[in-house]
Image (cartoon, helix red, strand yellow):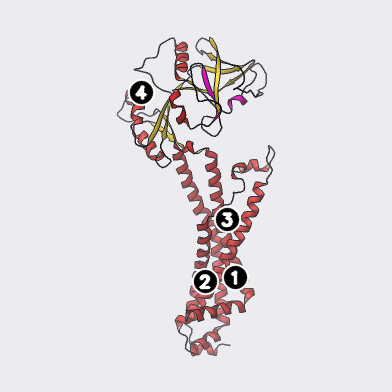
């Protein structure tokens, strides 16, 4: 019985193909708007995730002392980044490594002839180098006294300090003899030593502008500047890097560190906040696209109302030969649902075509200082040809939504048709 009613509904639609096309056109536009706007957030999210860097950055947690004194506590009660705190961090479940770092407390520069380059210089225990998550490009992960491992952008930052203008000079730090200059800011004295670059590492980490040295070298330079030996009882680290054992445990480890009274920041935490932001954006942009579907719903309702008025006598004949109110309701609901389904399917196909066009345009967009792509809120080189990403569940949802919109829009006109009296309907001209 249902198949017969469905066949009747399909036949009715094809009798008015022009009206079907115009009505479904609104659904096509609405469906495409929903898909493309939501798909845009997927592409932007992927671009943002690509900008974070390599996967090791997601499990990286930066730990610093707290700058706030809780009520009822004194500054002495605030946890410091000392050896005791490092031991507590090791005991947190989910921690793969704890990497304490000692900051150079005086001025430090690399020197290549007349050129110098500044950097973030920290001391680290050589045994902890494998946990930094860096990828070696040249040399070895060795930090013997008098050696350093240099970040990828240090060689690009050399300049002539006597020049009136800043003009960066490229220096091959691995193959060029270098000196390390330490300046005591208190009295202006300088200490220069030959330094060996034991290795360089690839870009894409939070250490791209960092120079790593043996922790004992940094402590020695700090003692030279202060004129005092380091007291193990009062010694504190400048910062501590904690490496979680997986992406999934990063947030829990971060919260556990904060519970110790320390400040902790992780890329995984930021990633979670970013994902929440994009979920909100999907709802907002999906709602904007949904307005077009709402307008299309009024078009479907208007078309179905006109169809009922034109086919009032036909409805009367159906009831006269035995069709029930439910049969009439089913026929018109099938018609409105098919309008939504057809519009949804065509809308999905149109979305895929537009996705290809837009992604190709972005991929082929010119780059450079004067390029319009510099004003876009995303990095076209990271996106490549994936600004618009349409997941399978998105286009399936769009088809279902378009069908439901058609059914919902046709419900009231269909109920009106089902309630028509056959006697009155047959008298209708």
Query: Which label was assigned to residue 23?
Result: 1
First of labels 1, 2 by sequence position: 1
Dot 1: element:
helix
Give the Cα distance between marks 3 and 1.
21 Å
Sequence-first tag of 4 and 2: 4
Badge 4 is on which residue?
A: 83
Pointer 3 residue:
36
The answer for how far apart the CA atoms under marks 2 and 3 are is 23 Å
On whether residue 147 falls in the magenta region, the answer is: yes
Q: Which comes sooner in the sequence, label 4 or label 1?
A: 1
Contact, CB < 8 Å: mark 3 with mark 1? no
Alpha carbons under labels 1 and 2: distance apart: 12 Å
Provide the residue span drawn in magenta.
134-155
**Mark 4 to mark 1 CA distance (whole Å):** 72 Å
The picture places residue 129, in percent across and down from the top left corner, at 46, 27
Query: Decide: marks 4, 2 in contact (CB < 8 A)?
Result: no
User: In the rendering, at what x and y percent does residue 126 appear?
Assistant: 45, 23
């Amino acid at each position: 019985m249902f198949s017969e009613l469905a066949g009747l509904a399909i036949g009715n639609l094809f009798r008015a193909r022009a009206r079907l096309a115009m009505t479904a056109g609104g659904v096509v536009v609405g469906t495409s708007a929903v898909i493309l706007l939501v798909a845009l957030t997927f592409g932007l999210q992927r671009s943002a995730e690509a900008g974070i860097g390599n996967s090791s950055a997601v499990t990286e947690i930066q730990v610093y002392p707290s700058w706030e004194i809780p009520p009822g506590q004194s500054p002495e009660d605030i946890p410091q980044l000392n050896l005791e705190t490092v031991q507590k961090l090791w005991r947190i479940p989910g921690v793969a490594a704890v990497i304490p770092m000692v900051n150079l407390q005086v001025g430090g520069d690399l020197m290549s002839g007349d050129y110098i380059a500044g950097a973030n210089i920290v001391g680290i225990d050589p045994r902890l180098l494998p946990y930094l998550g860096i990828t070696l490009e040249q040399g070895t992960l060795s930090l013997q006294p008098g050696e350093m491992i240099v970040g990828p952008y240090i060689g690009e930052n050399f300049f002539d300090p006597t020049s009136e203008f800043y003009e960066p000079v490229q220096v091959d730090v691995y193959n060029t003899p270098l000196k390390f200059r330490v300046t005591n800011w208190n009295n202006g004295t300088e200490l220069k030593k030959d330094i060996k670059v034991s290795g360089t590492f690839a870009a894409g980490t939070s250490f791209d502008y960092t120079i790593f040295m043996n922790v004992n070298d940094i402590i020695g330079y700090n003692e030279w500047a202060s004129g005092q030996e380091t007291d193990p009882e009062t010694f504190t680290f400048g910062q501590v890097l904690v490496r979680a054992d997986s992406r999934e445990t990063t947030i829990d480890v971060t919260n556990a560190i904060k519970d110790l009274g320390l400040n902790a920041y992780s890329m995984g935490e930021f990633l979670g906040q970013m994902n929440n932001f994009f979920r909100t954006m999907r709802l907002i942009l999906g709602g904007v696209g949904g307005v077009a579907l709402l307008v299309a719903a009024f078009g479907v309702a208007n078309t179905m109302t006109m169809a009922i008025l034109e086919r009032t006598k036909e409805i009367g004949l159906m009831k006269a030969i035995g069709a029930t109110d439910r049969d009439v309701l089913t026929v018109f609901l099938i018609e409105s649902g098919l309008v939504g389904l057809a519009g949804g399917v065509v809308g999905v196909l149109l979305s895929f075509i537009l996705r290809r066009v837009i992604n190709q345009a972005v991929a082929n967009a010119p780059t450079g200082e004067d390029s319009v792509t510099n004003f876009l809120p995303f990095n076209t080189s990271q996106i490549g040809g994936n600004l618009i990403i349409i997941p399978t569940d998105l286009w399936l949802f769009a088809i279902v939504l378009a069908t439901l919109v058609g059914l919902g829009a046709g419900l009231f006109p269909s109920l009106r048709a089902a309630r028509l009296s056959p006697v009155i309907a047959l008298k209708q001209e």
